[in-house]
Amino acid sequence: MSTQTVSGLTVAQLLLKYLQLEGVTKIFGIPGGAVKTVLSELALQQDSFTYVVCRQETGAAYMAEGYARVTGGPGVVLVTSGPGATNALTGVMNGHVDGHPIVLITGEVPEQLWGKGFLQEGIDGDVDVNAIYQAATAFSEIVTHPNNFQTIFTAALRAALSLPNQTVHVSLPDDIAGTAVPECQFPASPSVYRAVPACRDPQGTQGAFESIIAASYPLIFLGNGCRRALQNPQLLKSFISFVEKFQIPVMTTPDAKGIFPESHPLSLRSYGMGASTWSLSYADGPSHDALLIVASKLDECSAVGEYVLGPDLWSASLMPGKGGPVIQVDLNQRSIGKVFPISRGIVAEAGLFLADLCALGRSYSIDAVLASKIAQRFETMAELKINLPAMDNPAQYQSDAVPIMPAAVMKAIHDGLPSGSHIFVDSGNCVGWSMNYLAVDPPTTVNIALGMGAMGWSVGAVIGAKLAAPGLACVSITGDGAFLMNGSELATAAAHEAGAIFVVLNDNDLSMVSQGMKVLFPQNQTDFRQLYRLGNPDLKKYSEALGADAFDVHSPADMRSALTAALSQAEMHRKPQVIIAHIDKTPLPPYYNRKTQPTYL
């Protein structure tokens, strides 16, 4: 049967029953009076749910996003009304822009008290929480009666877990949460109330295939919308076979880094912010004459290379030479043709498009003309990789200097992390160092949040990831400024025995700002490093006070030793591990020394 009749459950009980149906076991938040009925029910269902009490609601939303990225299911946030709801906004909005399924449930004061100045009222008071979230998420509604709860909550789940994923908000007044629903039909599975889009365009895919086969030097550009599809080992294997058969180079956006194995001979690694020199050379060079873009919004951080188009800063040279075709594939038709003029737009789900493309490739017979093109592509890629290092400064990557080079920190991480690790890269200069100097192969994943570029995101997200995957190494790469924003969540990790690892690039500065200001305003003789210092806090003592093991490292040898110890202790002691890398402050990350810089600080 698709549904069953249930009687006498309260709205709070129904809510948890839906979350259980969706496979949710962790809920993140901070308790408060407006959610007391749901909290009471959670206390009775501790065998099914863990309420992860965080230190701030923004951190709770970041954790929920990390949890969602690892599980593929919804990350749920439960907070109280008023300031609880507004504190969660940045974290929820960050997840929405990057396309992750966060379900925010905010409590609300009883309806009969609306508009009367009750403490922390968030609907009919001076701050309308519902209006805020209607402007910041895909779906925001108020449950106004027990009988409309199912309609509203299943609509929220549909919006969150469709493709692309989105964030949603439901406001639940506490009196309604405690009211029983006399009788309702409860679904046997999520498929009763939601379906995942399965859109394909066979004719468009055939045209795309013919265009890239006809080109001399085609290029495939994968966006983060391909991540879930290529986590299917069979599809990844088929796609690798496809590009190998036709010798087509592949590069990714920063937020898709590592979804195609970066050790593969056809990988150009990532393009955009902190791009590999391989992707810059090939994409911005004169040779490639066909571009296939799959599931990328082509935002600034993804589509800015070395040469730029006027004031818009999107790379004109990313476009193929000789007027070659630009083919863009996306499930969201609003993304197609938004940034670059296209030859063909294909509305399709990334996984189905890639599967159809691979099927066409398997049945295609290679003639002498195509065989000659394939041989030329092979030689071009081989020559590129022989003559050009993947990273900006290999000497810094290999350096044993003290203080440690940021690039050398990346080498220690690359060499020391086990396969299958989850890496979370924060906003700031750590983006440039990580994107350029890390080489990542599946099943290791790199997670980054460049849609909003929220500092401190990875500090929370990595804890949520570790709670979702306790048997895997989960590592945050962050700067000291970002770490201090949400470092108090170390106490959350310690309380829940989450052995997440934090690698903190420590230079007592907001270096992306101070270095960027110097580059953007060279005529200004101000020493910007004196303006954005952080007070030189002792991050080791800070971390230990919050329940973590902590290591101060100054050299690559220290870094390797600390990472080995942290990996062991994280599992043995089940507590967070913080590695404070005291980095050389002078190197510029791999964007300020190119012909373009980020337009923001």
Image (spheres, rainbow, N blue to C red):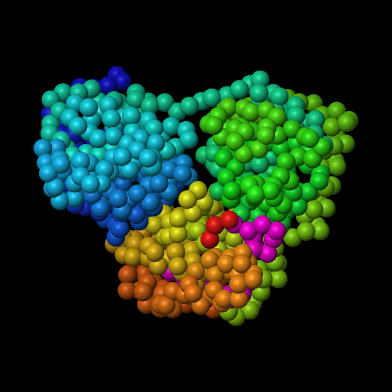
Q: Residue furthest front?
A: 523
Camera-side residue of 408 and 367: 408
Q: Name above or below for residue 514 compared with residue 376.
A: below
Can you give x and y, in whole percent of width and height, for residue 202 in the image? 63, 21
Q: Name above or below for residue 414 compared with residue 35.
A: below
The quarter of the rendered structure image containing the N terminus is: top left
Is residue 329 left or right of 551 when viewed as pictured?
right
The image quadrant of residue 161 is top left
Q: How many marks?
A: 0
Q: Which residue is drawn at 43% across and 32% down?
A: 162
The image quadrant of residue 188 is top left
Q: Which residue is drawn at 54% across and 39% down?
A: 225
Can you give x and y, in whole percent of width and height, for residue 379 in the image? 84, 47
Examine the structure image and report whether residue 421 is included in the region drawn in magenta: no
Is residue 284 left or right of 275 when viewed as pictured?
right
Q: Which stretch appears magenta? A: 576-598
Q: Is residue 568 visible?
A: no
Can you give x and y, in whole percent of width and height, for residue 327 in the image? 68, 32
